[in-house]
Amino acid sequence: MFTDFLSVRWRKSANGCLLNDMSHTPGVRQAQKQQTRQALLDAGLRLLEHQNLSSLGLREVTRAVGVSPAAFYRHFPDMAGLGVALVGESLGSLHAVIRAVMAETTDSAGIIDRTVAITAEYVARHRPHIRFIARERYGGVQAVREAIAAELQGFADEVAAGLATQPASKGWSPGELRVLAELYVDHMVMTAAAFLDVAPDDTAGLEHLAHAARLRMRIISIGRAHWLDPQP
């Protein structure tokens, strides 16, 4: 075993790390490629903490990672492509969460409490991602705006599907349920952005904001309950 180890040829990478011939195997190459891609995404997100995507330069990102611009193009077609990938990374995992919340209970108050709690927790864990979404939703990069809109439309689809199974939706048209779902989604996006303005350690401020978010959603629910009432 030891002699086999010694027989492997070693070489130095550009940053001085030792690499061996095993790094040329397909599995290792794929892992290294994925690591570089993730490093570019992480660097981009970090640099976007204080600026818009439209003002961020490609070389600024590659310099932060320590790779060439040519290496960037092996992963993304341009900076807009990196932005679109960040949208998926920021919001993609929430689809399953939304479906689970809608399936857990048909109780309106329970859904409201759970939704606000999940939003607060997600923002606490992913502040840079949510800040990126809040800033770029109406930013200067069309492809990213469209990607965010598509994700939010997907959320609305899932909420509408969940609402349709609830007894309170009896008599509602699909179009009406869709509008209600979009109202809920827009409200939670607004709430997520508001959580960013409260310091993570400001417990009282976070609870005040969560209470206000729950109250607004309950007001929407009251309107829903009386939507089909006979008009005077």
Image (tube, rainbow, N blue to C red):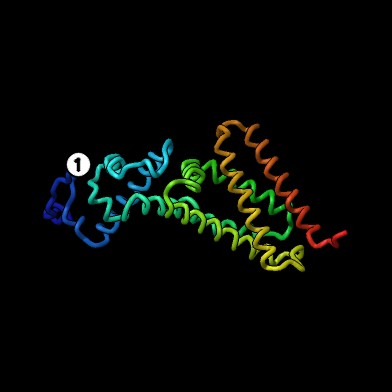
The spot of residue 93 in percent (x, y) is 50, 55
The spot of residue 176 in percent (x, y) is 69, 63
Instruction: Decide which of 34, 143 is in the foreground and name it.
Output: 143
Q: Quadrant of the N terminus?
A: bottom left
Among all residues in the image, which is located at the extreme right? 232
**Residue drawn 54% across and 55% down?**
94
Give the vertical position of 14 relative to 152 (above or below).
above
Tag 1, which secondary structure?
loop
Instruction: Decide which of 50, 42 is in the foreground and name it.
Output: 50
Q: Quadrant of the C terminus?
A: bottom right
**Residue drawn 62% across and 33% down?**
203
Q: Is residue 40 left or right of residue 136?
A: left
| Residue pointed to by mark 1 | 15
Q: How many marks?
A: 1
For residue 98, what is the image quadrant? bottom right
Give the vertical position of 162 relative to 198 (above or below).
below
